[in-house]
Image: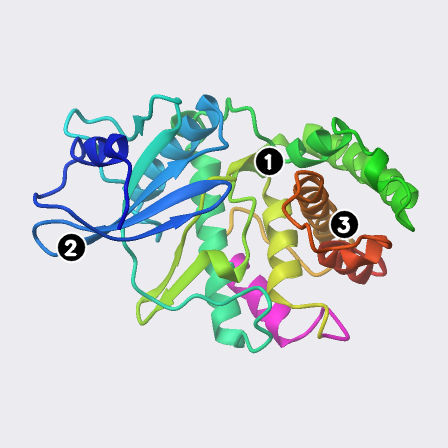
Amino acid sequence: MKIRPEIRNIIGKFSLKEPISVDSVLVNIDNDLYFITDGSGKKFVVREAKRVREKDYQFEANLLHVLGANNFGAPQLVPLKNGALFAKTKENWPVFVFEFIEGKQYKVSDIKLRPELAYLGGKTLGEMHAIASVHKKEIDENKKRNAFTEIDAFFKRDLAKLSSINGFAKFCDELKEFKTKAKEWTQFNPDLCGAIHNDYGPQNVIFDNNGCYVIDFDWACCGPFLKDVGQGIALWVQPNNETEWDNEISRNFIKGYNETAPKTVVLNSSLAFWACFACLSDACTFFISFLDGQYPNINLTNIGQCHRYKRYLYFEKYL
């Protein structure tokens, strides 16, 4: 497998047993992933993050370190031989090494997610929020990304290419309204905020016989815990295939969350608001990617072509 000499040299600086072999490489716009095996036969994942700022990856390293110290189910960071938690490339991109986790992942589009898996997913999210709520100083929440970053980034773009899309003006008004309300809520409820995963879908949870593990913390930031819960409900319930959100999957997700979370939640209009907010924020990510040319084969004519916006419409009726 091809691997840049710089990355191979950086991998050699981590606390791994020689010789190290590269099994496979996965390249995308956000990260380059190298799946490796060290001299003891143990597997690891090397991640070169290509679109994060220094404060953001320091936040991720701090968060994973705190979660690991509290026996949370997340990838364990492998330190460098000098004790640092990550290295840097000449472009100043961070390079992390994680222990590889074996298990089963489910895609967001998988409609056969079992209730017991939703329960485990909710319980694990609650555990993360409970740890984050009491370790704010160690995690250091001073990072550039926050719960409003995607909406802010969307409005900074030249949106002329999207202006002719049916429903686009309404979408922009909805973004402004939800952002204003979400910011007000956040300012008045600081005790219900902390480190959130910010991309808590079933595709970012690995299940095995012992429970589950959360992966992909590169979007993690400080924000309302309810944003994670709302996004979790939006992604785990599969509203494109359900007629009501109060169903066996959502009830089990909330049941699991409430067993471990710092504050219990219920399926009410408040949670529906955060599900809507999370869907709108994710829709911004889609449109930014579209403007960046990542979907050249999509001809956008209607706002409803964005799946996350359709999920927003699903939860809007519960406000």
Task: Pick whichever of labels 3 and 1 is earlier in the sequence.
Answer: 1
User: In the rendered view, would you say 187 is above or below 277?
Assistant: above
The magenta segment: 242-260
Residue at the image position 23 percent from the left and 39 percent from the top: 78
Under mark 3, the amino acid is Phe
Give the mark nearer the N terminus: 2 vs 1: 2
- Name the residue nearer the viewer: 19 or 203: 19
Question: Up-down: is 30 above or below 319?
Answer: above
Q: Nearer the viewer, residue 86 or 119?
A: 86
Report the residue marked by disc 1: 223
Local secondary structure at mark 1: strand
Q: Marks 3/1: CA distance?
A: 15 Å
Q: Is any part of residue 158 visible from this angle?
A: yes
* CA separation in Å, label 2 and label 1: 35 Å
Q: Position of residue 276 (x, y in %)?
A: 75, 51
What secondary structure is the stretch in magenta mostly built from? helix
Residue 18, located in which quarter of the rendered image?
top left
The reply to whether callout 2 and callout 3 are in contact (CB within 8 Å) is no
**Residue bearing mark 3:** 273
**Image position, residue 214 (x, y; %):** 42, 53
Specify the amino acid type for callout 2.
Lys
Q: Are marks 3 and 1 in contact (CB under 8 Å)?
A: no
| Residue at the spot of label 2 | 42
